[in-house]
Image (tube, helix red, strand yellow):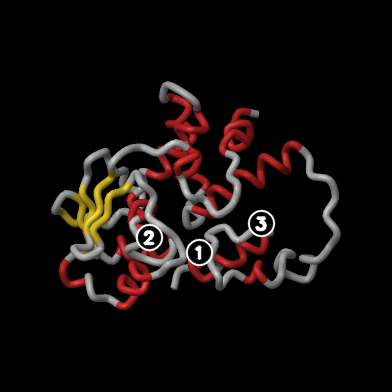
Amino acid sequence: MSKRHSAKYKIDRRMGENLWGRGKSPVNKREYGPGQHGQRRKGKVSDFGAQLKAKQKLKGYYANISEKQFKKVYTEAMRLKGDSSENLIGLLERRLDAIVYRAKFVPTPFAARQFISHGHIRVNGRRVNVASYRVRIGDVIEVKEASKQLALVLEATQSGERDVPDYIEVDHNKMVAKFARIPALTDVPYPVHMEPNLVVEFYSR
């Protein structure tokens, strides 16, 4: 088990929010942070603090991607035409691990990363084992034949915990998904309020 995977609920408690909307999250019972100082009274949050939390929350949601990768996505979002915060979300949602998670092939973003790295996913018929692979509109993502009956996959597809967003077309009988369009922030089914505009402000300082 990776360090990121084993610490996912610490991210929830540090943020004080149930990032993935899961029933198992300890935030449902303990809304304070982890560790011996977790219950300290919190003072007023500065602008920098709010921006930092927004960045940590967005990074954490996508399986706690590294700062280097996240900054690279931000830099590209700034180069694209249009609203930078919307561009940032669009690029993050085009990650292969995000698509695999959104399609409900696996239960969590952390499981999506591991599932891809172990070679269970094909894109347009060829195996891709890089979680950060950028999916294009019209790309077809499928679970390889030998992996379609894995307990992890069956549990995720049958779960009523979340729905597949309309920018992804899925056939769970065939375990195939198609990326239909790049979503806007309002299209993405985040269980918590995300503020990519504050992330842009954080890096623009």
Residue 72 in sight in this render: no
Give how far apart the Cα atoms at labels 2 and 1 are: 10 Å
SS state under label 2: helix
| Lower sequence index among marks 3 and 1 | 1
Query: What kind of residue is marked 1?
Result: Arg
Give how far apart the Cα atoms at labels 3 and 1 are: 15 Å
Image vertical order of residue 112 relative to residue 79, above or below: below
In the drawing, what numbered circle is on residue 4? Answer: 1
Q: Nearer the viewer, residue 110 or 4?
A: 110
Give how far apart the Cα atoms at labels 3 and 2 are: 22 Å
Q: Which class describes the residues within 10 Å of circle 3: few (<14), some (14-19), or many (20+)?
A: many
SS state under label 1: helix
Q: Which class describes the residues within 10 Å of circle 2: few (<14), some (14-19), or many (20+)?
A: many
15 horizontally vs 19: left or right: right
| Lower sequence index among marks 3 and 2 | 3
Residue 198 location, x and y as percent? 63, 36
Residue 74 location, x and y as percent? 49, 35
Q: Residue at x 20, y 56 (%)?
A: 122
In the drawing, what numbered circle is on residue 60? Answer: none
Q: Nearer the viewer, residue 6 or 122?
A: 122
Q: Which class describes the residues within 10 Å of circle 1: few (<14), some (14-19), or many (20+)?
A: some
Residue at the far bottom: name it: 151
113 horizontally vs 6: left or right: left
Query: What kind of residue is marked 3?
Result: Met
Q: Which residue is mark 2?
A: 113
Residue 85 in sight in this render: yes
Q: Which residue is mark 3?
A: 15
